[in-house]
Amino acid sequence: MKISIITVNFNDKTGLEKTLQSSIRLTLPVGVEKEIVVIDGGSKDGSVDVLKKYLSDITYWVSEKDRGIFHAMNKGVAAASGDYCIFMNSGDSFASEDVLEKIFANPYPEMLNADVITGGTFYISPEESTEEFGLPPNYLSLGFFYNKTLQHQSSFIKTERLRQFPYDETLKITADIKFWIQCLILDNGKYISTDVPVAKFDLSGVNARPEGAEGIEVRRIFSDLKLDKIICDYDLVMKPKNFKMRICRHFFSRALKKFFQDGIPK
Amino acid sequence: MKISVITVNFNNREGLARTLESSVSLRAPSGGEKEIIIIDGGSTDGSVEEIQKVEKEIAYWCSERDRGIFHAMNKGIARATGDYCIFMNSGDTFASPDVLEKIFSAAFPQPPPDVITGATYYCDSSTGTENLEFPPQKISLGYFFFGNNSLQHQSSFIRTKRLFEFPYDETLKITSDFKFWLQCLILNDGNYVSTDVPVAKFDTSGISSRPEIQKVIDTEIRRTYADLNLSKIITDYEQLRNLKWKLFKRVIAKKLKETFRVSINFR
């Protein structure tokens, strides 16, 4: 069993160093190997020098201009030789050294055929020095992706599937959501969630996005995947247009939240 | 514009006679043509004589053993040369001879839809009642799920191309048309248009509503959802159906009824 850790970087040498150190320190259970793949977009801030420091631990790296983060992630998949990939982009890091041991040490038969294995994520906001912990849902359905997504920093994805559904480079922010829907919902991929904290997600890079941009891209994903005649039903419930429905929705919003966002308990 | 009228028959001479009469007197659309195709499953009750009586009006017919109604419908499609097909099986008739003229007129929607469905007269010959029902104005997965409905194929003109793309699944006994609607209209974003023009008279006295039939229907529908990889979407709809808050469900049901013009059953 081989795990490929893919790191995408552009002009973030401090983040890159933090991520590389955390990936290098990961301990391995018996029968499991890891490889580190770094896709740098042609950084000019000294990131390449950082890479050269850790050359002996990096299996493959490249530093050249690319077409954006999802293009870089696709390049990473092309270079990966592992059975599962995890995208730990620069700035993010593993929650502890023994993540791989906790998740892959006892590969029970179910897990070996999983397309996606996820764990918990620490959400770190350095400005406000807060740290929140979130777990993935136990069970997935289309309703989950109406408003939320899975954290790729905490997900081990079967490389075969990443090759089957490459990230859509025409989407700037939500190509990973499109992948989740294609692989796990429409193709009925096997999804396993665990309670193991996998990643520390640094939120400081996220706030740069324009308001509402995600929503627009997600509607485009639904359209691309020909889900319009299904999503219209979800819209009816989630975005009711008449007054009575809004009242009902507000009154039952807690229950609705459970219905759409937490998935179904096992 | 050419319309293929496909009739499937098995040992229903009297119904076939009515259907043939109605199809023969059906006028072709202006500037267009119609053709009649009959697929008989090897009837022994004189059905073949009925066909032979009007043989010169029939573009193609055959009478041989087949594997069931959906196999017969697929055989009909294979012989169809029209742009659109309509399945008018024996016992059902056109509402009037000018249906094609009304629908395939100059006002026909562009670009041409994949499916255009009109209104249906539901006739119960035992009680003599007749109810006119209109098709939904728009459709979504929710329409098919909550209504447990299918569009009336007796009143639906389907683009022949689409029937070749998604042949009827012969391993299903009753709900193969339901599966076709899902494949064509929901999963492949097919273009659906409804019209209020009455197209067919559907004889309901033959329909069985025995609970065993309903059970077969439920099993087949669940299998179709699985075959079409819809399980992780249907779970959301099932959750909605299982919601315990009556008020919320009543409001949604009302909204769905307005949208689709059918009553929703939150069993």
Image (cartoon, rainbow, N blue to C red):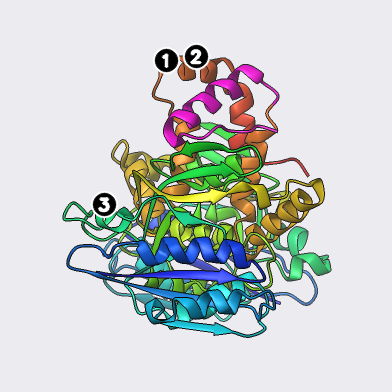
Label 2 residue SS: helix
Q: Is residue A166 visible?
A: yes
> Is the C-beta separation of discs 3 and 1 under 8 Å?
no
Q: Nearer the viewer, residue A243 or B20?
A: B20
| Residue at 59% over, 70% down | B9
Chain letter belonging to callout 2: A
Question: Is B261 left or right of B145, judged from the image as shown?
Answer: left
Same chain for mark 2 and mark 3? The answer is no
Q: Which of A109 and B37 is in front in this view?
A: B37
- Label 2, on which residue? A247
Q: How many marks?
A: 3
Q: For the residue carrying disc 1, how many other residues have a C-alpha within 10 Å: few (<14), some (14-19), or many (20+)?
A: few
- CB of mark 2 within 8 Å of CB of mark 1? yes
Mark 2, other Cα within 10 Å: few <14 / some 14–19 / many ≥20: few
Q: Position of residue B54 (x, y in %)?
A: 44, 76
Identify residue for label 1: A243
User: Image quadrant for the N terminus of chain A?
Assistant: bottom right
For label 1, the SS is helix
Q: Is residue B212 above or below residue A207?
A: below
Tag 1, which chain?
A
The tag on residue B102 is 3
